[in-house]
Image (tube, rainbow, N blue to C red):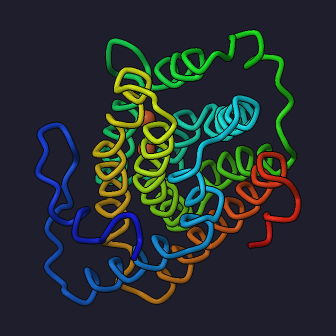
Amino acid sequence: MTALEVQKFEEIQEPNVRQRLEVNDQEIKNYLNEKMEYILNHRAVEHPLLNYYRKNKFTKEQEKKFYLECWYYFQYEPFYITSMAVNTRDYNILREVVLNVVDEVGGKVTHETLFREQINELGVSNEEIDNYKCLPTTTAINEGAMKLYGEPPIEKALGALYADETMSAVLATQLNDGLQNQGYDKNVRKHWLMHLNVEIGHSNNAFNAIAPYVIHPQGRELFEAGINKYLELLEAYWDGVDSIVRGEKVATN
Ligand SMILES: [Fe+2]
Ligand SMILES: [Fe+2]
């Protein structure tokens, strides 16, 4: 069983969390749910390192490397997502992109600041964050996302977004569990606690934006290419992180 079920995305009723728009065609709904199942069950999402972290404590050194790599993975993500808007003239897509990015930067403090504060709480200074040299696989997913979101076709970008945001909803549960298991209180975990629902809303942004484009096989092909490219980068990213956190041997498990 995966950490999250498709049903959670379909039924989210929280205020301020984006819900799925009604799709009248059951076949399209089934298709998008099938793709979500595929993402939720992919090794890149249910990665051995993440499942290990949910139940096993990291040393301070493991924890530091793990979160510093995460920092460089997510860095500038809202800018990349915003760049999707340039490759469409569809107001429906523009709305979903804007709603997504407003979550990231529209509050009293940005999510970037909240994440930096969490890393600081773990005992990692801003200087350590800024001077850290991340793995090539981390640079690859960061730059890969920039390319996937910034370049046409929009269907491929939305495939990447669907994979990215659906994964993020799972990641929020995994990292919250890991931090809780490590003994950190709600204040340290607040960034992930808040993201449990926010990321479901972001996955729903991608669902709403892509639905009209997967009526035809051509749209599905591009959408799936975006999903697969993102998951490929993600799997390599976690294998890389695993190799420096738990050591080379376990990375292939
Ligand atoms: Fe966020
Ligand atoms: Fe998100």
Instruction: Specify the quadrant that holds the N terminus.
Output: bottom left
Task: Specify the quadrant of the image occupied by residue 21.
Answer: bottom left
Expressed as whole percent of the image width and height from the top left, the position of residue 93 reads 36, 53
User: What residue is shown at x 18% (from left), y 73% (from top)?
Assistant: 23
* Number of numbered discs: 0
Position of 33 with respect to 12 (left or right) is: right
Q: Quadrant of ligand 2?
A: top left
The residue nearer to you, when weighing 171 against 180, is: 180
Residue 116 in the image: above or below residue 184 = above
Expressed as whole percent of the image width and height from the top left, the position of residue 3 reads 39, 64
Residue 36 in the image: above or below residue 68 = below
Position of 87 with respect to 37 (left or right) is: right
Task: Specify the quadrant of the image occupied by residue 61.
Answer: top right
Task: Specify the quadrant of the image occupied by residue 196.
Answer: top left
The residue nearer to you, when weighing 236 against 82, is: 236
User: What residue is shown at x 61% (from left), y 75% (from top)?
Assistant: 225
Expressed as whole percent of the image width and height from the top left, the position of residue 115 reads 52, 25
User: What residue is shown at x 65% (from left), y 39% (from top)?
Assistant: 70
Residue 92 in the image: above or below residue 74 = below
Position of 104 with respect to 45 (left or right) is: left
Instruction: Specify the quadrant that holds the C terminus.
Output: bottom right
User: What residue is shown at x 54% (from left), y 16% (from top)?
Assistant: 121
Position of 33 with respect to 120 (left or right) is: left
